[in-house]
Amino acid sequence: MILKILKYPEPVLSQPGEPVSEFDDKLRKLAADMFETTYDSKGIGLAAPQVGVSKRLTVIDLSMGKDPKDRLVLVNPEIVFREGKVYDEEGCLSFPDIREKVVRAAKVRIRAQNEHGKWFEMDADDLLSRCMQHEIDHVDGMLFIFRMSALKRDLNLRKIRKMQREGKW
Ligand SMILES: [Zn+2]
């Protein structure tokens, strides 16, 4: 089922998600729906708050549905190690048409549970590292616009207000 993706400034996007404690079919159905929604929007990741569910859950698939091995469900994820810095462009399904350079750690190690509750650790670099940091920010209630320089943030907030006035947001 394709879910509705909420856009900034929906309040749920800025609230830290609740930890997930029930690893049941409902959680797995939500994760499956989030993958379907991500593919439908041509995205590579989506966090539960973006579909109005204030929980610490995110799905990532860099292959955009082409390779099942790339499907990652991160429940209660946290970054346990980060290294280096990269300044590169990113976008967000809750900010359509906005792309901007944001600083992220080059490499991360994350710790998370899968959809069955099993804990695992994983190292990532390049796009996967960036995507994980972006999605883990979402479950913390942090949005990429607040990772931009003050100048870029203000420019983009103005652009959003203009689109809102014109009914394009
Ligand atoms: Zn996002």
Image: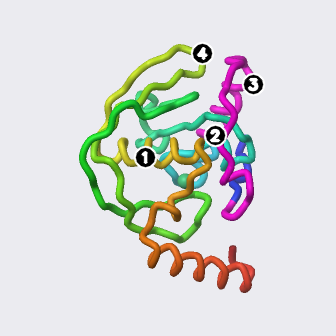
The residue carrying mark 2 is: 34
Task: Tell me where residue 107 appears, x and y as whole percent.
Answer: 29, 41
Kind of residue at badge 3: Lys
Tag 3 residue: 26
Are dots 3 and 4 in contact, CB under 8 Å?
no
Q: Position of residue 165 (x, y in %)?
A: 73, 84
Helix, strand or loop at label 3? It is helix
Mark 3 / mark 4, whichever is N-terminal: 3
Q: Report if the CB atoms under discs 2 and 4 are less than 8 Å apart.
A: no
Residue 131, which numbered label?
Answer: 1
> Does 51 sit left or right of 136 as displayed?
right
Instruction: Give how far apart the Cα atoms at labels 3 and 4 are.
Output: 11 Å
Look at 45% across and 78% down and name the residue there.
151
Q: CA distance from mark 1 to mark 4?
A: 22 Å
- The quarter of the picture where the N terminus appears is top right
Disc 1 element: helix
Depth check, mark 3 against mark 1: the one in front is 1
Is 31 on the left-hand or right-hand side of 153? Answer: right
Coordinates of residue 46 in the picture (x, y in percent):
57, 45
First in sequence: mark 3 vs mark 2: 3
Q: Residue at x 55, y 37 (%)?
A: 59
Q: Give the number of the disc on residue 116.
A: 4
Q: Earlier in the sequence, mark 2 or mark 4?
A: 2
Query: What is the three-letter code of the residue carrying label 4?
Result: His
Region rendered in magenta:
7-35
- Mark 2 Cβ inside 8 Å of ligand 1: no
